[in-house]
Amino acid sequence: MVIISLIILFLMIGAAGWMFWFWNNDPCPPLDPQEWWGPELEGKMDTSVRPFEVKFSEEMIADLKHRLLNTRTPPPPLEGAAFQYGFNSLHLNSWKKYWIETYNFTERERFFNQFQQFKTNVQGLEIHFIWVRPKAQTGVEVLPLLLLHGWPGSVREFYEIIPLLAQQSDKEFVFEVVVPSLPGFGFSDAPVRPGLGGPQTAVVLKNLMERLGHKQFYMQGGDWGGLVAADLATLYPEAVLGFHTNMPAVKHPCAIALTALSVLFPSWIVDPEVVDRTNKLQLYWRAGGYLTLQATKPDTINVALTESPLGLLVYILEKFSSATNPRFEERADEGLLDKFSREQLLDNAMMYWLEGRTAVRLYADGVHEGTKRWRLNIKPTPVPTWVLQAKHEIIYQTPTALRFKYPNLLNVTVMHEGGHFFALEEPEALAEDLFTAVKAFREFHERQKG
Ligand SMILES: *[C@@H]1O[C@H](CO)[C@@H](O)[C@H](O)[C@H]1NC(C)=O
Ligand SMILES: *[C@@H]1O[C@H](CO)[C@@H](O)[C@H](O)[C@H]1NC(C)=O
């Protein structure tokens, strides 16, 4: 308790310092809306939107299986340890065997291609995206929705929810869904020079939506997807009709101070029903090391992740376990299969094995460039916002703290289950909440007009 109090004291002193610095600093310099992130342009820029299909080539499959078969056996876990020290090596074999013998590459390739996908060049980067346009039905409006994943997720997180959003018929509206792979993730190009953090990624995505004919749209995102969407809502509030997120992270100094206080004195500040959600420090100490690693030396860990599919898989699975429920580390089977199927998790790993190999760099550019240079995350945005709070989300802030950034926070949905990968874990609940939120966004705009 003493240590925690000291840490919180430091956090509060830090927040006070930050506040001082914030109020004595110049406003953010404007971002270049056409900043070029790719290699030097040769010839004319191609702005066409081209169909794309996921392909699992024979060579890739043979190489992957060869690497899996030739994995060396890691040291055995400590006596009595489950997943407290990281991925338990006694569980490697079941995943390895499944990936080699049961994971059906032909069937999974078809699964990936069930939705239409495209690529288009934005600011020098080939951006991959799923684009589902529902069939027109009389009396049903079609609303554009940008869905954004984070790390170590991918567009795969949204495969279960896409049909729920695009094919509802009893509602007054359905969604035209655009699901891009963030730059450096999945099948999207990575930038060739430093500096593509959250705000710069937001510029790329806004340009993508414009190219698809949408000057205004709704957004949903968690993890980095939520952070990038927050930057987009801050930079271009006129483009965003409403923002739904399951991971808001408000860094306004007052919100940080309030969040620190809610850790220290939860029962004074937080509703009894969510009081157990306030203290996430334990999770950061036990499972947060990757943040520093990826924010400082991403290319070093990338060598290991590029060499070994099993290494890549367990690195990702460990995050899916601890961020879905921190108690899973005490379980001998890491709890993952309670919530997800092996196909879902291996599909997601495939998104990193195939091409998304520089994704971890987003932490370096996101933390250093994004935050320090632009400081957008402390600027409020007038965009109407709706927050879903899953039981085990890795950040908890009270609605009051969230309002420092989102003065038009229309509601907070408190879920009594679910974790960080909410779209994949609870697609029905997320879809239902999105419909409710967008209905409220529309009513908000009606009121503004009226
Ligand atoms: C893999 O999936 C394909 C397509 O669904 C199917 O034709 C094939 O029989 C499956 N292979 C195995 C080994 O189950
Ligand atoms: C806001 O959320 C609360 C709890 O989740 C719910 O009871 C209430 O009806 C919601 N209000 C609106 C306007 O949707």
Image: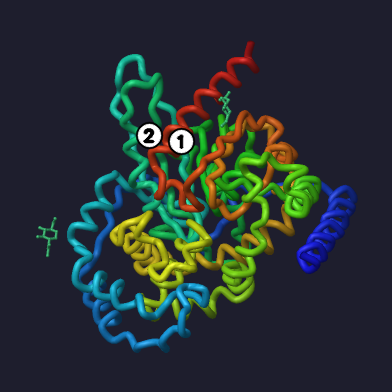
Q: Quadrant of residue 293?
A: bottom right
* Residue 392 in the image, given as x and y percentages of width and height: 54, 52
Q: Quadrant of residue 174?
A: top left
In the displayed structure, does residue 375 sit left or right of residue 156? right
**Which residue lies at the image location 39% right of the left edge and 80% below the top edge?**
89
Tell which quarter ligand 2 is in: top right
Q: Quadrant of the C terminus?
A: top right
- Crowd class of label 2 (few under 14; some 14 to 19; many from 20; radius 10 Å): many
| Residue 198 seen in render | yes
Q: Which residue is mark 2?
A: 165
Circles 1 and 2: CB atoms closer than 8 Å: yes
The answer to which of 103 and 324 lies nearer the viewer is 324
The answer to which of 64 and 269 lies nearer the viewer is 269
- Crowd class of label 1 (few under 14; some 14 to 19; many from 20; radius 10 Å): many
Residue furthest top in the image: 450
* Residue 414 in the image, given as x and y percentages of width and height: 56, 38
Q: Quadrant of residue 334?
A: bottom left
Q: Amino acid at mark 2?
A: Leu
* 73 to 252, vertically: above or below: below
* 337 to 305, vertically: above or below: above
Q: Quadrant of the N terminus?
A: bottom right
**Which residue lies at the image location 56% right of the left edge and 35% below the top edge?**
413
Q: Amino acid at mark 1?
A: Leu
Label annotation for residue 145: 1
**Which residue lies at the image location 66% right of the left edge and 46% below the top edge?**
275
